[in-house]
Amino acid sequence: MVEYLRAFLMARLAWSRINTLMLVSGAFGVFRRAEVVAVGGFTKGSMGEDMDLVIKLHRHMMDTKRKYRIQFIPEPVCWTEAPESLRVLARQRTRWQRGALECFFRYRSMLFNPRYGRVGFLGFGHILIVDVLGPISEVLGYVLIPAFWLLGILSTEYLLAFTSLVFTYGVCVSVCSLVLEEAELQRFPRARDLAVLTAVAVIENFGYRQLNNFWRVKGWWQYLRADQSWGEMTRTGLTGPKK
């Protein structure tokens, strides 16, 4: 829940504001049929079909020099199933990583291309930093920073300051997402729910985030091996809250 709020109420609203949104999640997307047909619909066999379609729409509208908007709207209520186990979650995250890499390299000619304006510079630049370089650099950081400290290359003061900055920033973004949700949508009627989510926003930085990055690096490896498997996504059904 914290991940969804952070992505939807912070990142995608911000990218929408400057018309540089690169992903409308498949479960939540509504598009004009004529434009989807014009770009050839979903790309067959794509691991990231939702991102792929959005990028194709950006490219098509810019190539034809037409005014357009691709926007995220937070008010509609949509239901989607989140993974119920770590095994299924791992398959989902490695697939997402493969999808992001697939889309980046398929449309790499748009990267920093003045023809595509903010989409080429900011949108694709963000994918490059967060999805292409991010998992590898962060996992390397988990190994190298403690190693440099043990070897005396990195001072203890710098290590503590840098670690505090990274984790504080992550917690602030998550908590601000909760504050924005409560101020605008108020979908959590009980104070206890907000308290639990706030605690999770802190705890997720110690273990869960690192696990996610491990899965993303695994997705990188699968992409290099041209692994196109979808993996079994076990569904339990939307049966309401568990007692």
Image: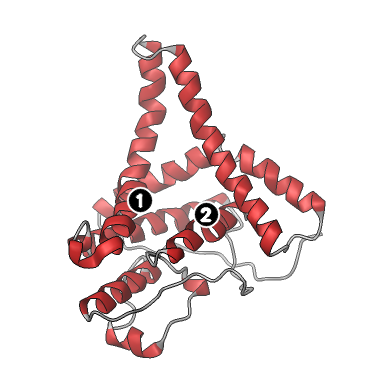
Q: Which mark is drawn over residue 131?
A: 1
**Could you tell me which residue is drawn at 47 percent across and 59 percent down?**
14
Q: Which residue is mark 2?
A: 89
Q: Position of residue 56 (x, y in %)?
A: 29, 74
- The amino acid on which the numbered mark 2 sits, given as a three-letter code, is Leu
- The amino acid on which the numbered mark 1 sits, given as a three-letter code, is Asp
Quarter of the image with the C terminus in it: bottom right
Q: Is residue 225 above or below residue 151?
A: below
Mark 2 packing: few (<14 Cα in 10 Å), some, or many (20+)? Answer: some
Kindly tell me whether residue 103 is visible in this rendering: no
Q: Is residue 110 above or below residue 6?
A: below
Q: Position of residue 89 (x, y in %)?
A: 52, 54
Identify the secondary structure beneath mark 1. Answer: helix
- Count of picture labels: 2
178 sits left or right of 105 in the view: right
Q: Is residue 80 above or below residue 207?
A: below
Q: How is the image coloured?
A: secondary structure
